Every structure is written in structure tokens, then in C-alpha cells.
């Protein structure tokens, strides 16, 4: 079946603009995660959703970052007033539940470049 | 101290070699552990989960030592296609923490 999809695949924006990144998880997956990966770095956890609720928002780096998930499916990550340090690959992953051993399946990522 | 630490490498090994990666984690309450593989400019993909009893999948063997808070990955008879970055992942209450990765290059 279809895997996790993300759009856009690449986004170039000017400093100060808002951007919206989209994640479409695997159908039926209730848990959804957002990460970001700066060049040559490991993954930084941002937020996860169980259904439409986000029990843990502590990973969001600043109040310019927000995320929502409606209908228990698609999620959007919004970055307001983008800064150059926001440049990274933003990865979304989904899993079938919040079980600790469940496999996370990653999307291809959105490469964000803030000029 | 970082929550998950890995030797960044790079490890450059010839085909057929055996190579081992180590990972340490700081939170003793961590509940589950994984190794992910990430190819250049690609998303991470699960390589294997890591169980306390140790587990093997073909040429790959993973070990967990909870007392020492240490995870390892052993790759035997390495192939050119094993060249990638290997990410150690530690899960605590569904908060997944990734190591920065260990880069492996297998050469002919």
C-alpha cells in the first residue's frame, strides 16, 4: 500500500515568511510524528499525535512552530516568520498505534531552505 | 550529556569485513530500542528492533545491555550496499530520541 507522503518535497522561502508542511500518514495509522534533521545531524523530535491530540508539544523549538492534525489523518506543520536556522529536512513518520515497539514509517521529507 | 550518543565515524571497511557500532543512552527508564538505516538524502528506515535477549537478522546482530545503557549493532560480511548512516533510536513513552548516526562506507 501507499506509504507516508509529504508535500512539498522542497520549499525555498524568504526569511520572515510563513510556511506550511503537509504529512499524509499511512491509512489507519493513529500515531503521527514530526522530526527535523539539520544537515549532517541526527533527527530532532518535534511533536507527536495520537489521533487528533498532541500529548507532547515539548519538542517544538519555539512558539513560531505549530502543528495540527484533523480527522485523525493528515497533519500540517506550520512555521511562522521563518528564520535561516529553520532550514532543515522536516520528516514525518506514522505508526499503527502508540505502542512502544511499533515501527515508525517515515515519509520522504520536506527540504526547507530559508534564504 | 546527550540523550543518545554514537560514534559518528566514519567507518571505512573493505567488503566482507565485520564492523560493530555502539550507542549509549542516558535515561535508564528507556523502554524500547531500534536501529535505523539512513541513506544519503533519504528518510530513515527501520533496520531492526533491539531486544534484551539480543536478536539477529541475517548478517545483522543487535544487542542491548540495560545495566550499562548500551546498544550495539554488528554487521558481518559487509556488502557495498551496507554503506549508509546507522541511527540508534531510544524510545521513552513514545518520545523517540535519535542518535546523530554512525556513517559506514564499505569499499571494494
Image (tube, coloured by chain):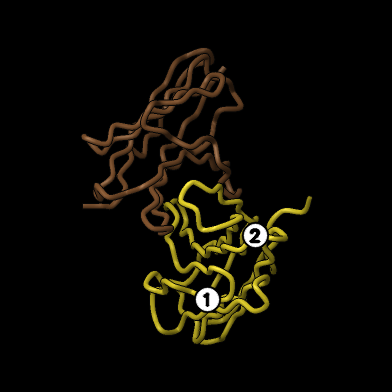
Chain colours: A yellow, B brown
Task: Work out whether B44 lies above or below B82.
Answer: below
Residue B24: horizontal and vertical position, in percent?
Answer: 28, 40
Position in image of residue A13 (x %, y %) = 60, 78
Give the residue drawn at x 58%, y 76%.
A52
How many residues crowd around disc 1 within 10 Å: few (fewer than 14), some, or many (20 or more)?
A: few
Q: Which residue is mark 2?
A: A29
Residue A72 place in picture, x, y as percent? 65, 72
Q: Residue at x 52, y 14 (%)?
A: B77
| Alpha carbon separation for disc pair 2 and 1 | 14 Å
- Which of marks 1 and 2 precedes in the sequence? 2
Disc 2 packing (10 Å; few <14; some 14–19; many ≥20): many
User: On the rendered structure, is A65 left or right of B9?
Assistant: right
Q: CB under 8 Å between callouts 2 and 1?
A: no
Residue situated in front as seen by the camera: B14 or A51: A51
Quadrant hosting residue B73: top left
State the mark number for residue A53: 1
Residue B65 x, y percent position in the rendering: 29, 32
**Relative to the observer, which residue lies in front, A81 or A55?**
A55
Q: Which residue is at a point 67% across and 70% down the rendered structure image?
A: A73
Quarter of image, res A70: bottom right
Amino acid at each position: 500500500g501507499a506509504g507516508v507522503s509529504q508535500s512539498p518535497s522542497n520549499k525555498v522561502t524568504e526569511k520572515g515568511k510563513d510556511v506550511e508542511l503537509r504529512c499524509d500518514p499511512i491509512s489507519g495509522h493513529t500515531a503521527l510524528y514530526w522530526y527535523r534533521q539539520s544537515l549532517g545531524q541526527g533527527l530532532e523530535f518535534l511533536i507527536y499525535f495520537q489521533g487528533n491530540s498532541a500529548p507532547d508539544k515539548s519538542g517544538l523549538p519555539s512558539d513560531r512552530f505549530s502543528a495540527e492534525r484533523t480527522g485523525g489523518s493528515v497533519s500540517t506543520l506550520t512555521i511562522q516568520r521563518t528564520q535561516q536556522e529553520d532550514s532543515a529536512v522536516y520528516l514525518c513518520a506514522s505508526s499503527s498505534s502508540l505502542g512502544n515497539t511499533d515501527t515508525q514509517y517515515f515519509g520522504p521529507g520536506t527540504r526547507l531552505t530559508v534564504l | 550529556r546527550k540523550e543518545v550518543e554514537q560514534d559518528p565515524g566514519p567507518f571505512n571497511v573493505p567488503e566482507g569485513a565485520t564492523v560493530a557500532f555502539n550507542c549509549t543512552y542516558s535515561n535508564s527508564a528507556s523502554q524500547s530500542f531500534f536501529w535505523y538505516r539512513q541513506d544519503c538524502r533519504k528518510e530513515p528506515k527501520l533496520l531492526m528492533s533491539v531486544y534484551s535477549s539480543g536478536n539477529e537478522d541475517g548478517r545483522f546482530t543487535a544487542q542491548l545491555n540495560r545495566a550499562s545503557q548500551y546498544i550495539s549493532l554488528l554487521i558481518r560480511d559487509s556488502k557495498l550496499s551496507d554503506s549508509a548512516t546507522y541511527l540508534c533510536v531510544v524510545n521513552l513513552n513514545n518520545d523517540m530520541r535519535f542518535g546523530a548516526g554512525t556513517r559506514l562506507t564499505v569499499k571494494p
